[in-house]
Image (cartoon, helix red, strand yellow):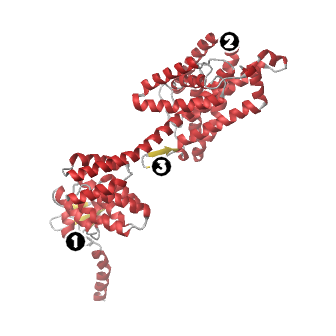
Amino acid sequence: MPIRLLLLCCLLLAPLAARALSPAQARALADGDTDARIAALDQAVAANAPGLAPFAQALLDDAVKLTPAAVLVVDGAQAHDAAGGAPAALPDDAADVVNNNRMRGALQAALAALELRAPDPARRRAAVAALAAAGLDESLLPLVEQALGAETDAALKSSLRQLRATVMVGASDPKRRLAAAQLLVDADDPGVRGLLIDRVAQEPDAAVRAALQDSLARLDARLAWGERLGLLFTGLSLGSILLLVALGLAICYGLMGVINMAHGELMMIGAYATYVVQNLVRAYWPAAFDAYVLIALPVSFLVAAAVGALLERLVIRHLYGRPLETLLATWGISLVLQQAVRSVFGAQNVLVENPAWLSGGVAVLPNLVLPWNRLAIIAFALVVLGLVAFLIARTRLGLFVRGVTQNRAMAACMGVNTARIDTYAFALGAGIAGLAGGALAQVGNVGPDLGQGYIVDAFMVVVLGGVGQLAGTVIAASGLGVLNKLLEGWSGPVLAKIMVLVVIVVFIQKRPQGLFAFKGREA
């Protein structure tokens, strides 16, 4: 019986021994200076040493101790020999293995390199990304080549080729560096650009340096398209926000002739309404947090519309036909609204979180990611534009608004309650401003001064597009958004604003009616 039990133990321990490091390998990885340990680690990874991955993880977890006779891996109160896996007693004088940041980085790179053989493509993809970010030593190049030979996924194969080239570009052999420079001609990763710039500055061989410069020039030409498209998208995103702000202003100013300097504060009210709805949903219905935006947008519209209707009833109704007094009164109201928000919510910005479906983005090019929240705002702006156009052109309220705008006295003679239509129209414009604030809360800070950054641009959009012209508002908002971003990249945000203002002033001097003007009896 004892002999059978001994044989059984040997059979059970044999696989563990086969999967363990040798005593010399374990000692070299755990003891000595950092350079020697990293060299031993590179050799173990290149040889695909059995048991390396769990031992490297134990080193990262600070779970390895040294004794003169063995290297021990500690798991709670128990320990086992790193070389054989056999249980071992933990002496009181066992020394801790200390890893500096350089050694930790090498261990993490080694674990990622070992993951190149993982059966799951997602794990291999993550390993390639980790190695590309951390950098690989030339000694690990055979491991990358083995993984490249065994890889079946086309996209991963391409990533591994690029990874191999980035390792070879720092090789000691000039022929290898030249081959790497030629391989990197087709690279499209923005991270490779920094590597090429460094290698060009350090490269002693003229032929290799010329090849690296050629690869860098071609990479820059490819990345330039991503930068141009990113600039265009950013401009369109800003234009969509300006469109949302200017749509409400186009009704208040364009159709009713009211210079409402508090329009930005109505947008701010919509943003704070979104913040309040977010907090209420989080507190009372946390499971539906990702849908809070769908509740917040109607609430933003209704709250801003109610404030706008109150504003029109109490103040603006008594100032029709007196634009200067309307401007001063609404400017004063804007200050009152800002202070009211500071008193209720505080002077600091508040946080509005994106729901999960508005987080992240879609990668169109290696250096161009389109955020979901900005894509959603562009789509939302187009939906609101369509609804406003339908309301103004196809509904009874829109007919009354256009009638009162063109000839108030005749509309009153036809039985239209002009005072009520004024209130409805102003409330509609204010509600659209609230929608703009609710949308803007998903991409920017929400604070008492939120509206001040957009009111001037919104007036410029309405004036440039043509007073009361929705088509002109769309074109002007998109054009100003793109022009702003183009000039910001060239001269900075402050000078860009000044130059845009100068362009608009010159344009209005030549064409006072804007891009689109009323024709016939409407004029």
User: What x and y, as percent, mark residue 236?
Assistant: 53, 36
Q: What mark, if any, has residue 363 been given in the picture?
A: 3
Determine if residue 430 is in view.
Answer: yes
Residue 519 falls in image quadrant? top right
Tag nearer the camera, 2 or 1: 2
Question: Badge 2: few (under 14), some or many (20 or more) residues near its Cα, within 10 Å?
Answer: some
Residue shown at 43%/30% (left/top)? 488
Of the residues shown, which amino acid type is indicated by label 1? Answer: Ser
Q: Are marks 1 and 3 in contact (CB under 8 Å)?
A: no
Q: Amino acid at mark 2?
A: Leu
Going by the numbered disc 3, the residue's amino acid type is Ala
Q: Quick one: SS at disc 2?
A: helix
Task: Decide which of 293, 2 is in the foreground and name it.
Answer: 293
The residue tagged 2 is 319
Disc 2 to disc 1, how far (Cα)?
A: 91 Å
State the SS at label 3. Answer: strand
The residue carrying pointer 3 sits among few (fewer than 14), some (14 to 19) or many (20 or more) residues within 10 Å by Cα, namely few
